[in-house]
Image: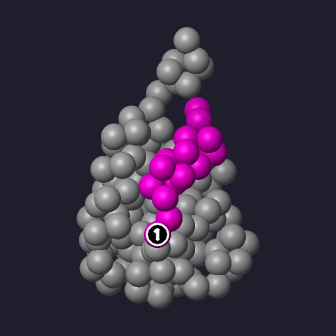
Amino acid sequence: MPAEQDSPPIRVLVAKVGLDGHDRGANIISRKFRDAGFEVVYSGLHRTPEEVVQMAVQEDVNVIGISIHSGAEHTHVPKVVDGLREYNAFDDTMIIVGGIVGEEDRLRELGVEAIFGPGASLDEIVEFVRENAPRY
């Protein structure tokens, strides 16, 4: 029996931050994660970075997937990172971003593990999370 089956499922928070109301991608990836055996928490629309951090800490997630199409990733993602650091949860929580994202290098410098743009393979996203999510 593989060790992965003995460990608890990966817990993922799919988050919509800011005024971005486009949630189709977030809903699709949430279902894909669920079907892959992950435990999924969906933030709902229009969350602040602080609310996302609170949800991540309270739900004890392994991964935060931020779905964004508003162009405000460089405003919101740093606040999520800073909030996780305040709770000493940054090192135990992988952050990935999906959607329309500019200046990917800036996000990677913050500690974002992966960025998935339009047309990214759902199977590749699941496999990336499965292989890289922190487990505890």
The magenta segment: 119-136
37 vs 101: above or below = above
* x 33%, y 81%: residue: 20
- Say if 65 sits above or below 93 in the image: below
Q: Position of residue 134 (x, y in %)?
A: 61, 42
Note whether residue 108 is visible.
yes
Do we see residue 85 in this rendering? no
Q: Tell me the residue that label 1 is attached to.
A: 119
Residue 123 sits inside the magenta stretch: yes
**Residue lying farthest to the top in this orientation:** 1
Name which residue lies at 71% across and 77% down: 105
Q: Nearer the viewer, residue 29 or 107?
A: 29
Element type where label 1 sits in the image: loop
Residue 95 place in picture, x, y as percent: 56, 59
Q: Could you tell whether 95 is left or right of 16 in the image?
A: right
**Image position, residue 108 (x, y; %):** 69, 70
**Dominant secondary structure (helix, strand or loop) of the stretch shown in magenta:** helix
Disc 1 residue type (three-letter): Gly
Residue 130's place in the image compared with 98, above or below, is: above
Q: Which of the 4 image quarters holds residue 59?
A: top left
Taking the image as shown, residue 8 lies to the left or right of residue 41, namely right
- Is residue 105 rendered magenta in the image? no
- Identify the residue at horizontal 61%, vertical 62% (top origin): 114
**Where is the N terminus found, in terms of image quarters?**
top right
